[in-house]
Amino acid sequence: MIRSIKQEWFSNIQGDTLAGIVVALALIPEAIAFSIIAGVDPKVGLYASFCIAVIIAFTGGRPGMISAATGAMALLMITLVREHGLEYLLAATLLTGVLQIAAGYLKLADLMRFVSRSVVTGFVNALAILIFMAQLPELTGVTWHVYAMTAAGLGIIYLFPCLPRVGKTIPSPLVCIVVLTAVYMISGMDIRSVGDMGELPDTLPVFLWPDVPLTLETLWIILPYSVMLAVVGLLESMMTATIVDDLTDTPSDKNRECKGQGIANIGSGLLGGMAGCAMIGQSVINVKSGGRGRLSTFVAGVVLLIMVVFLADWVSQIPMAALVAVMIMVSIGTFSWASIRDLRKHPLSTNIVMLATVVVTVGTHNLAIGVFVGVLLAAMFFANKVGNILYIGSEEADDGSRRIYRVVGQVFFASSERFGNAFDFKESVEKVTIDLSRAHFWDITAVQTLDRVVIKFRREGTEVELIGLNEASATIVDRYAIHDDPAAVEKLMGGH
C-alpha cells in the first residue's frame, strides 16, 4: 500500500506540480463559462472545479485525470436552474453523487467493454472539434492583436520544447500563459482577459446544505436531472479514463472512478458547487504537460482556489488569447489524425460508426447521445455480421427416406429467419435429423424458430430428431422450447 501511494503521489513531483499549475490556469475560464451556460454565478463553477479536483485526487481510480465542472453537465442544468433555482441544483448535485456511488458498487463501469474502439475514436474526434469550436467566439469579431497573441502562443507551445534542457523541464503551455500575460500587462493592448469573463470569488467555499424541502415532491423534481447528470458524468469520465489509459499506457480502476466521481460531486454540492465530471481537454493538457500522478490533480484544484481567491488581481490579467492557444493545442493533440488515414483501410461499418458518433456528438453537443448512437450502430453491424455467419447444409441418407441437415454458426434474433428458411418442409421423407453440434442457440427468438421448424416438419408427417446440442444451447432449448409439449403446440397452431 505504501509503495502504491508513493507511486501514485510522489513518483513525479516536479512534473505533476508544474502540470497542475497549467491545468489550474486553463480551468478558470472554462469553469466561469460553464457557470454562465448553467445560469449560475461564476463562483459556483469555480468552487465545483476546486472541490471535485481535490476530492477526486484521493478517491478516483485514474491517476492524472482531471475532473471539474464541465460543459456537458452544465447543458443539463439549464432548465432546472431556470425553473427552480440554485438550491435545487445543489440538491440535484448531491443526488447525482449518490447515484454515481451506487453505479460504482454495482460495477456498471464494466459495461464500457461494450463500447467499441470506433466509438471511442469518434468520441475523441468529436470532443476535439467541440473544444476547437468553443474557442471560436474568442476569435471572431476581434482585433488583429488577438490573432497575433494566439499565433504567438501556439508558436511558444510548439517551439519551446525544442530548446535544450529547459524545453523539456517546464511545460510549454505554462510558458505561453506567463509570457503572453506579461506582454498584455506591459503593452496594455485592448483585448479580452479572464477578468472580463466574470467576477472571481473573494472568499473560500463554506459548508452549505441545500435550502430545499425534504419531501417526495423535491425528489421527483431533481431525480430526472440527477439521473441524466449521473449518466453523462460517468460516461464522459469512463471515456476520458480510457483515453488517458492509452496516453499513459497504464490501467485504471473504472468502478473506483465511478465511486470517486460520486463522492466528489457530493462534496461539490455541500460546498456550493455544481456537478462535474472528468474533462478530456484538461486531462490531455495535464498529460501533455508531464502530469501522471494524483498530485497533479490535487495541485490543479488547490492552485485554482488560491489563484481565484488570493491572486484574483493577477489571474484576471491573463489574456484569453493565451488560453485559446492552449485549448487549440489540446484540440489538435486530442484529434485522432490516424483515423482519417485509416478510413481507407477500415471496414465500411467501422467508418460509419466512427463518423456517426462524431456527427451526432457535434450536432447535439451531447456526448451521451453521440456515444449511444455509436454503440447502437456498432451493435447492429456486429449482429448483422455474426448473423450472416450461418451455414446450413443437407444430405440424403442412403435409403432415401431420411435427410440430415447440418447447422454451423450462431442462431439468434438476427439469423433466426435465415435458419427457418433453410429447410424443405415439402420434401417427402420419413425422418429428418438436424445436427446442431456446430451451432449455438442464444435467445428466445432462436428457440421459437426451432419450434416452428420442428412443428412444420411434424405437421407434414415427418419425424424430427435433434442431435448435438451443446450444454448451453440445450439448457435454453429445454427451458423455452414447446415442440415436445402437445398442449403448447396446439395453442401455438390456434387449435388447428
Image (tube, rainbow, N blue to C red):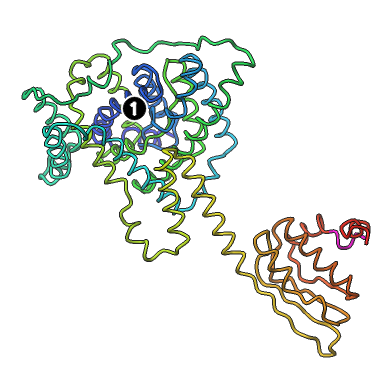
Examine the residues drawn in magenta and state their main secondary structure: loop
Q: Which residues are magenta?
A: 482-486
Dot 1 amino acid type: Phe
Across and down, in percent, residue 268 comes to 43, 20
If the image is split into quadrants, where does the C terminus sit? bottom right
Question: In the image, 196: left or right of 494?
Answer: left
- Taking depth in this image into account, of 61 and 369 the one nearest to the observer is 369
Q: Is residue 351 positioned above or below 94 on the image? A: below
Name the residue at 32% across, 61% down: 341
Look at the image and tell me in which quarter the N terminus lies: top left
* Residue placed under numbered mark 1 in the picture: 298
Q: Position of residue 93 (x, y in %)?
A: 49, 22
| Rendered image quadrant of residue 221 | top right
Q: Residues within 10 Å of mark 1 (few under 14, many from 20)?
A: many
The image shows residue 394 at horizontal and vertical percentages of 73, 81
Q: Nearer the viewer, residue 448 or 65?
A: 448
Residue sitting at 32 percent across and 31 percent down? 295
Q: Secondary structure at mark 1?
A: helix
- Indicate whether 217 appears above or below 487: above
Q: Which residue shows up at 43% across the image and 58% down it? A: 351
| Rendering coords of residue 357 (x, y %) | 44, 48
Pick the residue in front: 256 or 494: 494
Pick out the residue farthest to the left: 187
398 in magenta: no
Q: Is residue 467 above or below residue 384?
A: below
Of all residues shown, which one is farthest toward the front?
Answer: 141
